[in-house]
Amino acid sequence: MAQLKFGVIGHKGRMGQALEAAIADAGHCLCVGVDAGGDIAAHAGQCDVLVDFSAPQALADNLAAAVAAGRPIVVGTTGLEAAHFAMLADAARSVAVLQSGNFSLGVTLLAHLVQEAAARLGNDWDIEVLEMHHRMKVDAPSGTAKLLGEAAAAGRGIALADHMESGRHGMTGARAVGAIGFATLRGGTVAGEHSVIMAGNEERIVLSHSAENRMIFARGAVRAAEWLTGQGAGRYTMQDVLGL
Ligand SMILES: NC(=O)C1=CN([C@@H]2O[C@H](COP(=O)(O)OP(=O)(O)OC[C@H]3O[C@@H](n4cnc5c(N)ncnc54)[C@H](OP(=O)(O)O)[C@@H]3O)[C@@H](O)[C@H]2O)C=CC1
Ligand SMILES: O=C(O)C1=N[C@H](C(=O)O)C[C@H](O)C1
């Protein structure tokens, strides 16, 4: 693979630093790194690909910079809302865009397994997604938890937004039939723990993934960037990259 020049948004952050190492390990070069207050638009044209692990409020400018420079963009930022997904779809009309809540091989495969299991089990199996992350994480549920919830919903042929239950507290009443529940834990330096629990009558299936180091996300994002530079405008996923 030819050496690529990367533009990293969120460069001084935890993921930005992991990415810098993964970019060097893969034989590529960090062309520019920006953080809050920086201007990626001024540098995007010097890069072959942009990678964004920053904050949701930066997404509009980052996508605009990619579109103006005609460069592909990998988005790993989580905490995205419906308006952000509309921006991603809009940018994908002009450039190649790959957004994922998790760039690890393990979670990409886990999402397949969750979808398959949910498709085979009836609504009498309650689905709950449990996640734990380090104390500094600012969004909840995690992007990965939502990705896994989406996979379960796809398996059931329903829209997650119509069946999501999160942040239970107080007199909640009994669990709604067909709900997909989310629970969030925060503490320490946990890189990322996710379990999808399928609870039936007197039996339970638990499908889990443990991230031991955030380098797995950084390596996955570099692999996604390599793959994306060969693609035309459009919206792509880690399933496309990994051929799953
Ligand atoms: N998809 C995946 O596989 C993964 C996704 N993530 C997600 O990536 C994001 C970053 O995580 P992490 O590195 O741990 O967070 P950090 O807080 O460590 O880093 C965030 C970085 O983004 C920068 N930033 C904040 N706002 C802007 C802005 N408006 N424009 C440009 N840069 C900005 C910060 O700069 P400053 O310090 O100057 O504010 C900081 O350098 C989160 O959304 C996280 O959930 C994390 C791991 C894996
Ligand atoms: O903020 C993190 O650290 C992580 N964020 C992503 C998420 O929200 O799922 C991916 C990973 O779990 C680590």
Image (cartoon, rainbow, N blue to C red):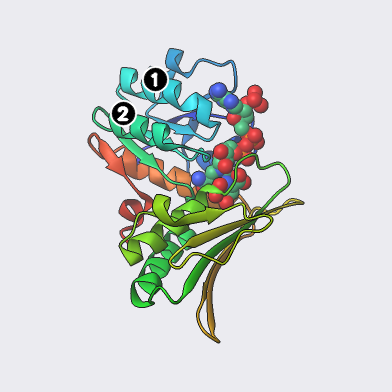
Q: Which mark is residue 65?
A: 1
Q: Quadrant of the N terminus?
A: top left
Residue appearing at x 46%, y 27% in the figure: 59
Q: Which mark is residue 198?
A: none
Q: Position of residue 23 (x, y in %)?
A: 51, 39
* Residue 83 seen by the camera: yes
Mark toward the start of the polypeptide (1 vs 2): 1
Q: Position of residue 53 (x, y in %)?
A: 53, 35
**Left or right for 54, reference 85:** right
User: Label 2: which residue?
Assistant: 91
**Left or right for 194, reference 117:** right
Question: What's the amino acid at mark 2?
Answer: Ala
Question: What's the amino acid at mark 1?
Answer: Ala
* Residue 34 seen by the camera: no
Q: In this view, which residue lies farthest toward the bottom?
A: 202
State the residue in front, 243 or 200.
Answer: 200
Circles 1, 2 touching at the beta carbon (< 8 Å): no
**Left or right for 228, reference 26:** left
Q: Position of residue 67 (x, y in %)?
A: 32, 22
Whether residue 238 is situated above or below residue 59 in the rendered picture: below
Question: Count the marks: how many?
Answer: 2
Residue appearing at x 49%, y 68% in the figure: 127
Q: Position of residue 141 (x, y in %)?
A: 57, 49
- Mark 1–mark 2 distance (CA, rounded to whole Å): 10 Å
